């Protein structure tokens, strides 16, 4: 086997092995199915709930909405004239879709310098940290998935200004996040995970 051919085969094998951790669980509409398939998700979320007080179903519904549980999710590319790529819509990345600047703030404030957005433990901890700050600064209950999501999406300043009120689509999405959090809560109770 030639050296270039071996290099190509090795590259394909390595990339195939590494990409599976980023795929979404099979049934995203069932919390029990998600945690059965990926028990590390539940343990990460329970640790975050203990540390920051943000309920597991709120975290799950947020991750569902932001990344559909895909660890290396990115925003779509933008194109000039519909064909010339000019970069992504934002720097959002990973399970939590945290922006570069907000992720850097989280790492500074928590001392978690090596935290990665494509690691479920770090992503859930970020969500907990962010929502804990939203509770402190804005008085949003940690169990209020709708308002927490609006503050998460718009930023705390945008939320306090009510910028979401001019975005019917976002209010509808926040309602869906709240409904999903309730569904996940009921499902987790049913399968004995809460």
Image (cartoon, rainbow, N blue to C red):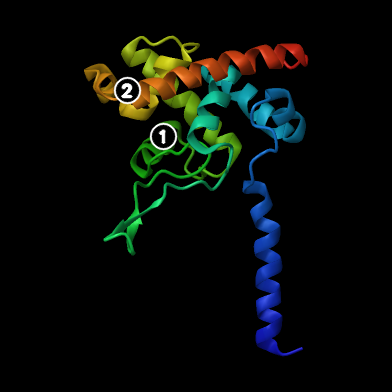
Depth check: give the residue in front, 39 or 183: 183
Q: Which quadrant would residue 175 be assigned to in this image?
A: top left
- Which residue corresponds to the image point at 70% horizontal and 34% vertical from the top-left? 40
**Residue 76 higher or lower than 80, as above or below:** above
Query: x%, y% of residue 153?
Result: 37, 29
Q: Which mark is residue 106?
A: 1
Number of numbered discs present? 2
Reading the image, the residue beneath label 2 is: 168
Q: Is residue 65 left or right of residue 167?
A: right
Q: Secondary structure at mark 1?
A: helix
Residue at 68 percent across and 61 percent down: it is: 16
Lateral position of residue 156 relative to residue 143, left or right: left
Q: In this view, which residue lies farthest toward the left? A: 161
Q: Earlier in the sequence, mark 2 or mark 1?
A: 1
- Residue that appears at 37% across and 44% down: 100
* Quadrant of image for the N terminus: bottom right
Q: Residue 128, relative to residue 123: is it above or below?
A: above
Disc 2 secondary structure class: helix
Depth-wise, is mark 2 or mark 1 nearer the camera?
2
> Which residue sits at x=57%, y=44%?
71
In the rendered view, does 72 fall on the left or right side of 34? left
Q: Is residue 140 above or below residue 12?
A: above
Quadrant showing the C terminus:
top right
């Amino acid at each position: 086997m030639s050296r270039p051919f071996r290099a190509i085969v090795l590259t394909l094998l390595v990339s195939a092995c590494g990409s599976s951790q980023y795929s979404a669980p099979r049934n995203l509409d069932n919390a029990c199915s998600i945690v059965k398939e990926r028990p590390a998700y539940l343990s990460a979320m329970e640790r975050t709930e203990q540390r920051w007080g943000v309920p597991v179903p709120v975290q799950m519904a947020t991750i569902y909405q932001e990344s559909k549980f895909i660890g290396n999710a990115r925003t779509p590319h933008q194109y000039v004239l519909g064909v010339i790529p000019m970069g992504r819509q934002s720097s959002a990345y990973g399970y939590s879709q945290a922006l570069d600047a907000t992720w850097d703030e989280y790492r500074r404030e928590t001392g978690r310098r090596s935290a990665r957005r494509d690691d479920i433990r770090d992503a859930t901890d970020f969500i907990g940290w962010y929502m804990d700050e939203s509770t402190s600064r804005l008085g949003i209950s940690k169990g209020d998935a709708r308002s927490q999501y609006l503050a998460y999406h718009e930023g705390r300043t945008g939320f306090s200004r009510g910028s979401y009120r001019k975005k019917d689509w976002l209010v509808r999405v926040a309602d869906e996040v709240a409904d999903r959090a309730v569904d996940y809560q009921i499902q987790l109770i049913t399968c004995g995970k809460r």
